[in-house]
Image (spheres, coloured by chain):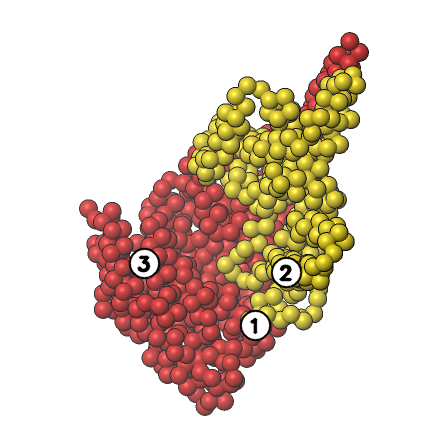
Chain colours: A red, B yellow
Amino acid sequence: MVTRSSNRNIVSAIVLGVAIALLAACSGAGTPSDDGSVGAAGEPPPTDGATGETVAGADTITVLMVGNPQMEDIQGLTEEHFTAETGIDVRFTILPENELRDRVTQDVATQAGQYDVVTIGAFEAPIWADNGWLTDLSGYLAEDEEFDGDDLLQPMVTSLSGSDGNLYAAPFYGESSFLMYRIDLFEQAGLEMPERPTWDEVAEFAAELDGIEPGVAGICLRGLPGWGELFAPLTTVVNTFGGTWFTEDWEAQVDGPEFTEATQFYVDLVREYGQDGAAQSGFTECLNTFAQGRAAMWYDATSAAASVEDPNVSSVAGNVGYVYAPVKETESSGWLWAWAWAMPQTTQRAEAAWEFISWASGKDYERLVGEELGWARVPAGKRASTAEVPEYQEAAAAFYEITQNAIQEADPQGPGVQPRPTVGVQFVGIPEFADLGTRVSQEVSAAIAGQGTVEQALADGQRQAEAVAENYRD
Amino acid sequence: MTATTTARRGRIRPSARPPETAVRRRGRAWTVLAWIAAAVFFAPVAWMVLTSLHAEVDAATNPPSLFAPLTLDQYRLLFGRNITPFLVNSLMASVLSTLLVLGLAIPAAYALSIRPVERWRDVMFFFLSTKMLPVIAALLPIYLIVQRLNMLDNVWTLVVLYTAFNLPIALWMMRSFLREVPREILEAAQVDGAGLVTTLRSVVAPVALPGIVATGLICFIFSWNEFLFAVNLTATRAATSPVFLVGFITNEGLFLARLCAAATLVSLPVLIAGWATQDKLVRGLSLGAVE
């Protein structure tokens, strides 16, 4: 008898204990609405792990973004400079690009509405806009005088608009591509880099400069598989060689003579005079190679210049010249990319979300970054007015003009010699391109590594591209 | 494992006299092998810690610069990005789910080993069968259900899910540990007039404790490291540390050193938990392994 009653006592004690613990935990997590304003007042927001919708009040927005340096900067500046002024608390989630795409797709498709603002690239903007996933920003733009929409660079606006011509994402920073070269090595070899080089000239320079100093490659080019890695520079080469992925009426041209010639040229160039381990080099690896002085030239994003000129990161700072993207058949060949702020259709707090976007994409934010963090870190490349700021001119003296011009010259609607079916310079603006480009890039990357041939890679690519094109032919 | 084998060998040695040198040589060979294996497994971890103490530029060089100057910058940056909420969420999800799992698995395992219910094999198989579906296949339905329940971005969702994930493993582990409890001492306890509670507390618990600790630690580690559901079911409030980790991966700029610093920091709680329970753990895990 004794044991049984003590048994019951223990059981009831446990039940009571668990119930109390649960209650305590629930009420702790379920009433954080006051805490939200505490967070706004300057203290870090409390870690209320629980409850979904009720936590985020009208004055809290959630932002999903990629972890690029510019995004880290804004995360650091938001509380003191945005929340303090507007009373809008901002919660950030940072994910890598691919996870971010999945999350947004999922969120919009299931109407979950977990995010009020997301960063998207120039590739997604028109596609998602036409899918009806994003809020049309043109109305907000027109009403927000402080934002000064006319100041935005036209190619940026074009590439972030839907097929209805309305803006669906406000640019945060933009870039084109250009050729960086080592002034000292060119002098040493007695060579002179023209302001608008051709690819043939670049190949000659690479041959001359390869090995000019021990461990220095003639040129550094991306070889890492990925539509946004290898095929960013390679597609611009294809464009200027007269090739294209698709004709205007969706005929695949991947095994066409121009596409083949361009790819063969690129592969040969990087195999003969390129950096070590080229097949595994993406933007990051190339930045390392070039910044450590192990390549005489580098063709890549204009945004690389800020790092190349930063003495903390780069041993060649101050020693680098910048010229336009090399060409062959076309007048210019730089790419066009932007990271931009968009508002999913499912947002619950559109007004507050726009207030954030307007701040993040505005002139004053650029000035704020310049003054707080240094003018080299300004999220530039989206506004004409940026290049007129004297402090920015000074900080980016070596490259700001050419960057701005390269962006202005880029024509996302007609980057090659023939009309295109979609908007985009270094990519085709269809959702299938991410997969198509990545698969073809794997074979081209293998060719760079010496396994397989360009012909084979492009023959396979043609078949895959043809399958994609069929969906779009009427 | 290696610790117990060497220990056992050490005990055998004095009695086995004639081939002593051979045995000793073999013992030494095993020790060397164990050290090499340990070094191989530990090297990536050491590399991670070392990289986390380097500047971003030094972390990215090829060939690697081993002796670059050390700095704590990356850790400073981590706290600048406010890692704490993520750690708290992870801790909450892992600890609570582990407690729940143990609370459910121990009685269940008792009913399947010490006093087995009828058809206990079927029950065991049923529990195992829940692990046969690839987790990714369950993601979509679970996402939709959680969304309908309005429980997205909520740590309690993770607590429930992790409990469900780990329950079968815990049950299987606990069953094999409880089977180690010798029948005889249970009977002896009964003869001495001990009731169920006394038996559990004074006879079963001491024998099974290493097993419980090992099971708990494994459940804790699994929930701590879980990424797939964490990244899909949370957003800004309930995100756990693995989700925080991947946020450092970027296509623009260098991130290796920071990622290593974050990974080091996130591994610490597991390491500490392992350390704290080391003696129990070794006993527990080798018990299970023998079974």
Instruction: Work out whether residue B270 or residue B180 is closer to the camera in this orientation and state it.
Output: B180
Q: Is residue B3 above or below residue A269?
A: above
Residue at horizontal 21%, vertical 54%? A249
Of badges 3 and 2, the one in the foreground is 2
> Label for residue B33?
2
> Label for residue A413?
3
How far apart are the alpha carbons under marks 3 and 2? 64 Å
Residue A43 in percent (x, y) is at: 72, 43
- Give neighbour class at mark 3: few <14, some 14-19, many 20+ (Cα, 10 Å): some
Mark 2 residue type: Leu
Q: Is residue A439 above or below residue B284?
A: below
Mark 3 residue type: Gln
How far apart are the alpha carbons under marks 1 and 3? 43 Å
Residue A77 in view (yes/no): no
Disc 2 is attached to a residue of which chain? B
Residue at horizontal 59%, vertical 76%? A315
Residue at horizontal 30%, vertical 68%? A454
Residue farthest along the top direction in this orientation: A1
> Label for residue B63?
1
Instruction: Work out whether residue A65 or residue B75 is closer to the camera in this orientation and state it.
Output: B75
Disc 1 is attached to a residue of which chain? B
Mark 1 residue type: Pro
Residue A105 in view (yes/no): yes
Residue A438 in percent (x, y) is at: 37, 57
